[in-house]
Image: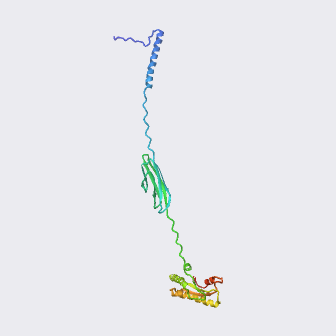
């Protein structure tokens, strides 16, 4: 038969009551001490450090673009101005690569929207500026050409006579030649030469003198090359004075061959 191993009780069944209690206290103390050691060991175990935070993303580019003035006439220029940040590559459509900040004159032929593109590690940013090109105002119309009547009044001058005379005075030759030159350049103009006199002398005498003066002017014009068909003559004598005072200054103004445009 196999040998029997005697069983040793954890707590002696028949141990004196005081000793049993003492053994139990030792056992509880031992378990408490063991638990404290395990707890303290766990508390002193170092926690793993947290992972480092990820690096911040690179800043996004910024961009602005303006045109001054933003409305121009065709053929004029305007100034583009721009500012960017956080960009390594900056360009403007129609201009090309530019510095990060700057300005440049442009002269678009037509209305144009300029687009600036700024690129960097943080992305891409764009900005636009609109330039409106207008047609220049039409030139003012030329002034209307003067009429023949206006030209006649500006260029044909009266011829003055001495008292009781009908021949052309020497000092009137230049004026009459200028009249001839103009009338030859405008052969379509028809006119009347009026013969006038001062107030001295009879009405009949002055009518005859006025007629002589008008015909003297006409004769010189025709000799100078002006068509006789363009010229009429009439005498008013002293009936239509230009000046009504009775002195030589006034009388001199009345002794003349006066040109009148025929409409």
Residue 218 x/y as whole percent: 55, 87
Quadrant location of residue 58?
top left
| Front one among 131 and 100 | 100
Quadrant location of residue 219?
bottom right
Single out the residue that lies furthest toward the left: 1
| Front one among 108 and 193 | 193
Residue 79 x/y as whole percent: 47, 57
Q: If the image is split into quadrants, where does the C terminus sit?
A: bottom right
* Image color mode: rainbow
Vertically, is 9 above or below 44? above
Q: If the image is split into quadrants, where does the N terminus sit?
A: top left
Residue 145 x/y as whole percent: 53, 75
| Front one among 1 and 171 | 171
Quadrant location of residue 199?
bottom right
Vertically, is 226 above or below 57? below
- The residue depicted at 51 percent of the width and 88 percent of the height is 223
| Front one among 44 and 239 | 239
Q: How many marks?
A: 0
Vertically, is 97 above or below 150? above
């Amino acid at each position: 038969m196999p040998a029997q191993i005697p069983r040793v009780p954890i707590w002696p069944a028949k141990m004196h009551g005081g000793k049993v209690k003492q053994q139990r206290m030792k056992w509880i103390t031992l378990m408490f001490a063991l638990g404290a050691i395990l707890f303290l060991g766990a508390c002193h175990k170092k926690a793993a450090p947290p992972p480092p935070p990820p690096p911040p993303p690179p800043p996004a580019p910024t961009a602005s673009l303006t045109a001054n003035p933003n409305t121009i006439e065709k053929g004029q220029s305007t100034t583009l101005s721009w500012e960017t940040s956080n960009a390594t590559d900056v360009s403007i459509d129609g201009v090309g690569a530019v510095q990060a900040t700057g300005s440049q004159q442009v002269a678009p032929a037509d209305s144009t929207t300029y687009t600036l593109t700024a690129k960097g590690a943080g992305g891409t940013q764009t900005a636009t500026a609109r330039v409106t090109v207008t047609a220049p105002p039409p030139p003012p119309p030329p002034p209307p050409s003067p009429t023949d009547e206006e030209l006649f009044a500006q260029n044909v001058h009266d011829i003055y006579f001495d008292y009781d005379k009908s021949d052309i005075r020497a000092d009137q030759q230049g004026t009459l030649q200028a009249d001839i030159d103009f009338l030859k350049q405008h052969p379509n103009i028809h006119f009347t030469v009026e013969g006038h006199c001062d107030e001295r002398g009879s009405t009949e005498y002055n009518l005859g003198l006025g007629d002589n003066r008008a015909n003297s002017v006409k004769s010189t014009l025709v000799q100078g090359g002006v068509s006789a068909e363009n010229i009429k003559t009439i005498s008013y004598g002293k009936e239509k004075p230009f000046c009504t005072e009775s002195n030589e200054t006034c009388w001199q103004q009345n002794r003349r061959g006066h040109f009148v445009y025929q409409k």
